[in-house]
Amino acid sequence: MRLLTAVLLSVASPSLLATALTVSLVTGTFLGVPHNYTGNGQGFRMGAFDVHNPHTAGLVLLDVTLTGIGSGDDSTAFSEIGLFIDFNNNGTYEPGVDVRYAAAYVAYPADNGSLTFTEAIELAPGETKRFLVVGKMSGTVLPKFMDGFRTIVTSISATGGTPTGIPTNFNEGIVVINHHTPLRLEYNVTGSGPPYTYAFRLVLDNHDGSWVPGQEWGSVYFGQAVFGSGGTVPFAGWTTNSASYPVGPYVSTGWSSFQVAGINYDCPVLVDNISPTDYWMPSAVGDYLTWSGTVGTFLDEGQMSWSMHRFGGPTVAGSANIEPAYRVGDYIRVVAVPAAVVRPGPLETGSGAGFLVGAFDVIAHSNAATLSSLTLAALGTGDDSAAYSDIRLYVDANGNGAFDPGVDTPFGASFTAFGADDGSLTFNDTLNLAINETKRLLVVCKLNGSTPASYGQTFAARITAISGTGQNHSGLPTAAVAGIRIHAPAIGVTSTGMKLSAFANGVGPGGLGLSVADFVLANNAVGAAALGSITVAAAGSLFDQSAFSFVALYEDSNANGTFDAADTLYGTAAAAFPGDDGSLAFSGVMNFAPGQSRRLFLVVKLNGGAAVGDDFWARVTALGVGGGVEVAATGALVHGLTIVPGSDPAGLQPGGGKNGDKGSGGCVAAAPGAAAAVLAALAVWAITRRRRQNFRLPQGR
C-alpha cells in the first residue's frame, strides 16, 4: 500500500497505554445486625468493591488495604474481618462458594485502623473481580446500640501503573440495632430425629456489665427464629409460629405480637409460674430459669434467637432486644480455619512430606467428647481422582497452625487420591477432647499423581460428616478451606518502534539486518512461565510479501538494548510475510522465571522491492504460553521504518544482503535533500496511481 506524505505525517505513532487496575465501590445499603451477629458462624457481607483491569495487558493484584470507619470501635467489635472473591458474580456472600482472598484478621489494630490482605492473583485484560468484605460481630467488646461500621479501600498494590479509584467512597455498612442484656439463653438438643427435645436455661451472667439489682424482666417473651437465606441476612425469612417453638411447661400461656427493631414477631409469653408472677427479678449473678419441651425442628448453633422485654427497674427501662441463643451440651462442632490459597506448581510434593492445604478446628462444648471419624469431600476444578499422590490428616500437635513432619500426629489412614473427582474420603481414628477444648486438624497432600494438575486449576475440600460422642454435631458441612490454586503463567508484551529511515535494499550494518521494533516480554505471574510462540502482524503501505528477503526475531542476549551479532535467533527466520499486512508465527522455547523480562528485536532485510515513501509497522498479536494462560497477547502497533531515496551498496553486492550474507551499510539518516526527494517521489506516485489507492491501517492504529 502507498500513503501520501501529508497523510503519513498526520498519523501519530500509537503510544502505549498506561497499565493500571481500577477500584470502584459496589453500592449497597446499611444492614442492621445484632451486636454479636456472626452470620451462622460463617460471617456476613458488610461491603463490596470491584477491581477491574481495563487494559490489554495482564496484571497481577498483590495486596488490598481496608480501613474501618464509623462510630463503632473497629478494634474491639469484630471477631473476624475477611475478604472473599465473589465466585459466581451474583453480589451475594455465599459461604462455601465464594473464594477467600488472603488470610482473615480477628480485628482492626485500632479504631479506624487499616488491614492489608496479601495474595497475588492475575487479572486478564478486561477482567473484573468483585471482592466482598465479610465480618463477624462477636469481638472482645460488644458494640453499642446504633453503632455504625463502614469499610473503604485505601490502597492496593499491583503490577503495572498506579491504581485508580482509591480511596473508594463509602455508602454501605452495618449498624447495631439492639441493646445489650445481661442475660444469656442456653439450650441443649437431644434425639437422633424429630421430635427433638430441647432443654433451656436463661441465666443472669451479666456478660455486658449492665445489670444492677432491681431489674425486672416482665412478661418474658421467649422467641426462637430460623434464619432465612442460610443465615447470611439477619431477620430475613425468619419464621415465628407455635409449631416451631419448644415451649415447654408454659402451654397455658397465650401468644403475643412483639416488635423488635421495627419487625413484629409472634412469641409465646413465658411467665414465672413459681411465684406466680408475670415478671422475673434475678437477685444475683448466676440466677436462672429453666424449661424444656419437644419440637420437630432442629436448630443448630446460630439459628436461634430470642428477645425479652424490660418490665421495670433501674436503667434502660422498657428496652427490647434480639439476642442469640447458645447451644451447649454433648456434641462436637467443626469449623474451617480461614487461610490464604496455597499456590504450588502442578507436581508439588512439599519437600516429599506433603504440604498444608487447609485446616479445620474440632471443638467440644460443655461435655468432654471423642471424635471417631471424619469425612472429607473434595471440590474445585481439578481432577481429585488423578492429581493427588497422597492425602492425609494430621492433628496439630504443637498448636502452631503449621505442618511439622515428625511432630504432628496422623489422624486415620493415608490415601493416594479421592475415589472420584469431587469424591469423599473417610478418616477413622480416635481424638479425645476435654470440656470446651479445641483441636486443629491439618489437611496435607502431594500433587504428583497419575495425571498432573494443570495451570489455573483449583483444589479444595470441606468436612461433610463426622462421628463421635453426642448428638446432632454442629457446623456441617463446613465451609471449604482455601485450598490450592495451581499458579498460572501470564506473559505480557510492550512494544517500541525504531522509526528508521532505510533504503529499499537495506540489509543493516554488517548485513545483519535492520532492527525495526523492540518487544519486551514480561512474566507477570506468581510462578515460572514458558513461552512457546510469538505471532507478529505487519501493517503500513509497504508490500510485506515482496519487499523483504529476511524477517526474524532475535533475543537481546547480552542485554545491551541494541541488536548486534551477539544476539540469539528465536525460532526460524522467514523470507517474507505470507501476504500484505500478513502475520508470521515464530516458534521456540523461552523460559521465564517469576517476574523476569526478556527483550526481542524484530529484524528485517529489504530486497529492493519497496518504493520511496513506503512505511512498515508491526505488532505482536498472539503469545503461546506453554501449559498456562495467555494474559497479554496483543502489543501496541509500532512504526518500524520508512523507505527513503538511494540504495545500500551492501545490498547490491553479489551474494550480499538479499541472500542474508553480511555486508556493510543499510540503515541511513535522511540526507538534507532527502525530504524534498521523498515529496517529489510521492507526488509522482500519487498522480500515476501505480499501486493501490486505498490505504487502511489495521484496527487499533
Image: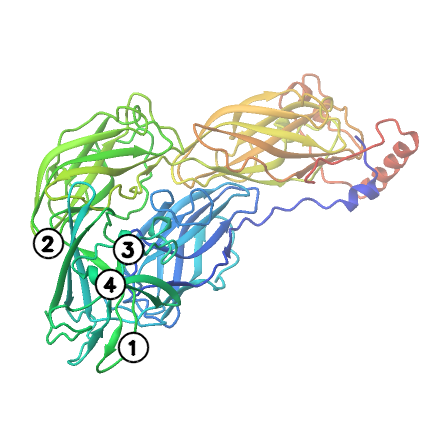
Residue visible at 57% across and 31% down?
622
SS for callout 3: helix
Distance between the Cα atoms at labels 4 and 3? Answer: 12 Å
Q: Is residue 435 above or below residue 150?
A: above
Residue 41, visible in the rendered structure: no
Distance between the Cα atoms at labels 3 and 1? Answer: 25 Å
Whole-percent x and y of residue 437?
11, 51
**Which mark is drawn over residue 242?**
3
- Residue 499 is drawn in which quadrant? top right
Q: Nearer the viewer, mark 4 or mark 3?
A: 3
| Crowd band around label 2 with a 10 angstrom C-alpha radius: few (<14), some (14–19), many (20+) | some
Q: Amino acid at mark 2?
A: Ser
The answer to which of marks 3 and 1 sits earlier in the sequence is: 3
Whole-percent x and y of residue 592?
43, 34
Q: Amino acid at mark 1?
A: Gly
Residue sitting nearer the eye, 465 or 514? 465
Q: Nearer the viewer, mark 2 or mark 4?
A: 4
SS for callout 4: loop
Q: Which residue is mark 1?
A: 318
Q: Amino acid at mark 3?
A: Ser
Q: Is residue 271 above or below residue 449?
A: below
In the shown orientation, is residue 304 left or right of residue 670?
left
**Which mark is drawn over residue 400?**
none
Residue visible at 39% across and 70% down?
70
The answer to which of marks 2 and 4 sits earlier in the sequence is: 4
The answer to which of marks 1 and 2 sits earlier in the sequence is: 1
Q: Which residue is mark 4?
A: 222
